[in-house]
Image: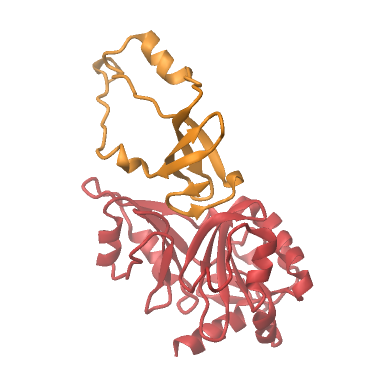
Amino acid sequence: MSLSIHHHAERSPIYELHGNAALTLLGERLFVAGSQSDSEQLQCCALIDLSNLPRVGFRGTDSATYLQREGYQLPDAPNRAVVQASGESLLRLSQTEYFLLGSLHDGGARIASEEASWHYDEGQANYLLPRQDSHAWFALTGAYLPKLFAKVCGVDLRAEAFSVDAVVQTSVARVNAIVVNAGIADLPIFHLLCDRASAHYLWGALLDAMEEFDGKPAGIGSLLDSATSAAG
Amino acid sequence: MTCPLNGPRNISEFTYGGELKQMPDPNTCSVAEWADYVFNSENRLGVVTEWWMHTASSYWFLAERHTGSDEILRTFDPSELFNQRIDFAVPEAAQ
């Protein structure tokens, strides 16, 4: 039986825009699978919906200690990210706020359990920031990324100014967003996190902006392949 | 404007938060003093210190701005002025 979004309660905010695209399961979560031609598309210019992949935030003066105890490596300055050995990205947004992005390798299982296992401790200033239902998550890939972002964002995101593991919190197509350079050896990748209620608009705005670079939506299959080969 | 956390950004990314004012002690000040603190602004001509927020990161900071020339002289993290936690005692009547 083919997978149907209607059999799953957890849906991306833009699932209606995926039309009849083939779906795939990563853990218990549904994503657009993508096609064979996606790997070429990814190198050129592609937009991928990762909104169903788990993510969570923590804030407080004790958050750094808490996350280190959980086995995470932390960025030593705000607006930097560190990719963990198991594939998660850990973003530092301010002196005391962190944002964790789940890995494609485990379907975000580690981050999901991180959120589930947190509990309020009066003696510890470490507060959970649920991000699954507040933000949408898109991945953008390809050689045209800096040119694409120059059209919709006021910050210089060319490689010389925006290195791998850099984070910017800014406005993208008039929507507040967090952009992370998550590029790997043979593929430029930006992760973009934005207000979930604006996802519908931003998806369309980004596709419109990438039209001149032959940008198209893609699935997670090729992205997962690239991430796996880079990690291997 | 240069955000102390995020660097130089378009002014459209910022939200104004009002003048920096000394808060009177809510337990001892008069109603008139408290109302003045909450509602009134000095609106001075000259260099003033104001609250601003970088909207994309919800980060509040302070800026010194000349209200005549609109020139922003300095922006800085509020921890320069606010370096300890302030707890408010709940008045007994409210408990």
Q: Can residue A204 be seen in this view?
A: yes
Q: In which quarter of the image is the C terminus of chain A?
A: bottom left
- Point out residue B39 in the picture as x, y percentages from the top left corner: 47, 18
Chain painted in orange in the figure: B
In which image quadrant can residue A203 be found?
bottom right
- Point out residue A85 in the picture as x, y percentages from the top left corner: 37, 79
The residue shown at (58%, 45%) is B11
> Would residue B21 appear left or right of B90 to someone viewing this image?
right
The residue shown at (63%, 52%) is A175
As drawn, B46 above or below A112: above
Q: Is residue A195 visible?
A: no
Counting labels gives: 0
Rendered hue of chain A is red
As drawn, B38 above or below A18: above
Q: Quadrant of the N terminus of chain A?
A: bottom right
- Point out residue B48 in the picture as x, y percentages from the top left corner: 45, 29
- Point out residue A160 in the picture as x, y percentages from the top left corner: 53, 73
> Would residue A90 appear left or right of A212 to someone viewing this image?
left
